[in-house]
Image: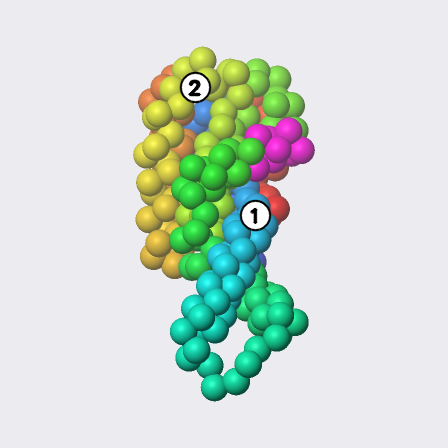
Amino acid sequence: MAIFEFTESDKALIKNAVSEAEKATSGEIVPYFVNSSDNYEETNLRVALYFALIALGLAGVLSYSWSLPFVITPLEVVVFTITLSAIGYLISRFVDPMRKWLTPSETMMERVQQRALTAFLSEEIFHTENRTGIIILVSHFEHMVEVLGDSGINAKVDQKDWQHVVDVILNGIKAGKPAEGIAEGVKKCGELLVAAGVDKPAGNPNELSDDIRLG
């Protein structure tokens, strides 16, 4: 799988964006990046099965039509089938476009949502005084973004309103600039919180780190 790695300047860019966005709101924005939300092993195994069926079908057709210049034994058919199956598995395992093409979008969306919920709990984003934590999970392989707000945020911001944040980040990913996209998405998130009335009371501390989390 293609791995995206953030440089120190990328991390600083995102951290500064979070700091700036939180100046006018009590929302605690936590950007969280993963290269993939799952390894989609079931897809790899399904491709291996497809290749095995192709191998069996090919061996059967060629044998039945007498197209082979030699006789093949059952053992050779088994070896051929296993070899082609292994090739299919490895192609799916290491060729991202193939695995992504063969994985249903609904499955990827479900895994990204599950990853966001797991990260929300593991990073203790719920651990703020007024339940104003927000996670922006960016999953690079799927080109998907999930935004989850705690109860104090959800009382003022509807889930569908996060689509503006999602769109900005996805544009950055598609342009090959995930760091810039995340920074712009964080900025948009801050603007949305201010517009929704998630104000910053006097003396409100910075309760969660501004650094990007890498899963």
Separation of marks 2 and 1 at Cα, in angstroms: 42 Å
- How crowded is the residue under tag 2: few (<14 C-alpha within 10 Å), some, or many (20+)? many
Where is residue 174 drawn, in percent x and y? 35, 54
Q: Residue beneath label 1, please?
A: 42
Residue situated in front as seen by the camera: 94 or 89: 89
Q: Is residue 198 visible?
A: yes
Residue 106 coordinates in the image, percent (x, y): 43, 37
Q: Secondary structure at mark 1?
A: helix
Horizontal and vertical percent for residue 136?
A: 49, 36
* Magenta residue span: 115-123
Left or right: residue 147 compared with residue 166:
right
Task: Determine the residue positioned at 61% across, 75% down.
Answer: 73
The residue sitting at 38% across, 38% down in the picture is 166
Residue at point 42%, 48% (across, down)? 143
Mark toward the start of the polypeptide (2 vs 1):
1
Residue type at numbered disc 1: Glu
Give above or below for 175 relative to 202: below
Name the image quarter holding residue 199: top left
The residue carrying mark 2 is 198
Q: Are marks 2 and 1 in contact (CB under 8 Å)?
A: no
- For marks 2 and 1, give the one nearer the viewer: 1
In percent of the image, x 34 and y 57: which residue is there?
175
Q: Is residue 170 above or below residue 66?
A: above
Along the line of sight, which residue is nearer the eye, 205 or 122?
A: 122
Picture coordinates of residue 55 (x, y %)? 50, 66
Viewer-proximal residue, 38 or 189?
Answer: 38
**168 inside magenta stretch:** no
Q: Amino acid at mark 2?
A: Val
Majority secondary structure in the magenta region? helix
Label tally:
2
